[in-house]
């Protein structure tokens, strides 16, 4: 039997140090919300592959779709020989995303690539160079998207020079946002404002309810495209299929990835027809974009959402998390804030003096791991524990995971 240690020793020889992992258990199999390592130990998954497994690990319908498509063909390059699964998926996404206007969808491979293409399209359409992201934002690790990402370490440190014409505005305060176009960049040079509905890596921060409606109205007034980065918050994570629906926002462009194809590499830019069509022929695309196996998996994901009422399950999970985390906030002094929206929830840990409790967050995550629960730490100070469990998680698994977290909080509170 291969052990975790044997694999870790080999990994140390062949995988670069920069490509880290949160745990030292090596996965043998995963099903639903349970991950099993090569030594047979099982873990409840509150990470979901960083919001990728909303329909659960190895969902039978996704597995069947992948097998069926793989037996037909795995690649022709959509730019050479197109195929039906990509076209049918585009049609469904255009109907599913917010907005009563005509839309089109472009498929690429990763969240960062989707954001890059959204920026390209926005700049091409508006003939303006400036892109405004937000403080605490996370949009990816490529040169452009790490520039748009706010946190320096580990995402930007040592990797400069960065892409030009990227600006970071204050998040959650509309007056401060509006003033940024006096002190930071002028509206005439701004192509797009790119926003996560709920900031993910930045700490699961949701803005006040009036923020995005005001931002969207400001963008419309000044000919700026409003781009919603729904890569982590989309696909049912917040109780709506896309988080911008909570505020009735219809973005000009939207990026979708992560849980779109249940772990298969696929992302999309979906937007207004006239904006998407503004780019010249051949201006966007890529060898692997709209991979047929990934598109088939995504079609199965959309079927699962409809057939298994996953949005309703997401709402119930969100209610459970909100109530439980609220109790912890009263019970444990270290839990200073309950953050997020719906089933995209986190707890922010602070010391008695108001400083971020990053070390305790690490200790809590390790306690959870040692007791069979996978969690994630996030936030610019590393003091937020976020949960992204599959929406198909069983009630007893969810409760067991929360019990482990509570036990860990009792350990690190002092």
Image (cartoon, helix red, strand yellow):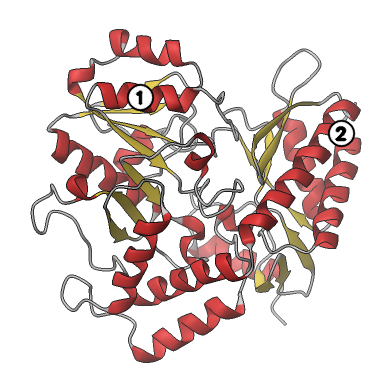
284 vs 405, nearest the viewer: 284
**Residue name at image x 83 percent, y 28 percent:** 329
Mark 1, Cα crowd under 10 Å, few <14 / some 14-19 / many 20+, is few
Q: In which quarter of the image is the C terminus?
A: top right
Vertical comparison of 175 with 17: above or below: above
* Residue wearing tag 2: 327
Labelled disc at residue 9: none
Seen in the image, is 315 located left or right of residue 250?
A: right
Mark 2, Cα crowd under 10 Å, few <14 / some 14-19 / many 20+, is few
Image location (x, y in percent) of residue 409: 86, 37
Q: How far apart are marks 1 and 2 (CA)?
A: 37 Å
Quadrant of the rendered image containing residue 56: bottom right
* Residue positioned most to the bottom: 71
**Residue name at image x 34 percent, y 76 percent:** 85
- Helix, strand or loop at mark 1: helix
Image location (x, y in percent) of residue 249: 43, 36
- Helix, strand or loop at mark 2: helix
Labelled disc at residue 217: 1
Vertical comparison of 208 with 54: above or below: above
**Residue name at image x 29 percent, y 8 percent:** 182
């Amino acid at each position: 039997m291969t052990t975790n240690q044997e694999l870790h020793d080999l990994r140390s020889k062949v995988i670069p140090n920069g490509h880290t992992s949160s745990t030292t258990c090596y996965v043998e199999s995963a099903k639903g919300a349970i991950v099993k390592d090569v030594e047979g130990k099982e873990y409840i998954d509150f990470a979901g592959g960083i919001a990728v497994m909303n329909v659960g690990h190895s969902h039978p319908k996704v597995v069947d779709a992948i097998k069926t498509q793989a037996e037909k063909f795995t690649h022709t390059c959509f730019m050479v020989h197109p195929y039906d699964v990509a076209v049918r998926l585009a049609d469904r996404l255009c109907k599913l995303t917010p907005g009563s206007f005509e839309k089109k969808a472009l498929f690429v491979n990763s969240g960062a690539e989707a954001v890059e293409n959204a920026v390209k399209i926005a700049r091409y359409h508006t003939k303006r160079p400036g892109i405004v992201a937000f403080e605490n934002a996370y949009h990816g690790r490529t040169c452009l998207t790490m520039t748009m990402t706010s946190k320096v370490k580990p995402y930007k440190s040592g990797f400069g020079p960065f892409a030009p014409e990227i600006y970071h505005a204050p998040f959650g305060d509309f007056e401060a946002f509006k003033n940024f176009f006096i002190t930071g960049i002028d509206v005439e040079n701004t192509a797009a404002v790119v926003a996560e509905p709920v900031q993910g890596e930045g700490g699961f921060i949701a803005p006040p309810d009036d923020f995005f409606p005001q931002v969207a109205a400001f963008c419309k007034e000044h000919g700026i495209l409003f781009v919603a980065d729904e890569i982590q918050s989309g696909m049912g994570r917040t109780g709506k299929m896309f988080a911008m629906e909570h505020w009735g926002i219809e973005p000009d462009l939207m990026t979708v990835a992560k849980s779109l194809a249940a772990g298969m590499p696929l992302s999309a830019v979906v937007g207004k027809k006239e904006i998407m069509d503004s780019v010249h022929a051949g201006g966007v695309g890529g060898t692997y974009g709209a991979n047929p196996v990934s598109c088939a998996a995504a079609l199965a994901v959309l079927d699962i959402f409809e057939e298994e009422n996953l949005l309703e399950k997401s709402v119930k999970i969100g209610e459970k998390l909100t109530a439980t985390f609220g109790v912890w906030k009263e019970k444990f002094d270290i839990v200073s804030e309950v953050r997020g929206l719906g089933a995209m929830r986190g707890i922010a840990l602070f010391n008695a003096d108001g400083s971020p409790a990053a070390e305790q967050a690490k200790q809590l995550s390790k306690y959870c791991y040692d007791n069979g629960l996978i969690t994630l730490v996030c936030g610019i100070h590393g003091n937020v524990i976020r949960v992204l469990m599959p929406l198909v998680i069983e009630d007893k698994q969810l409760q067991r995971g929360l019990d482990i977290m509570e036990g860990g909080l009792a350990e690190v509170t002092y």
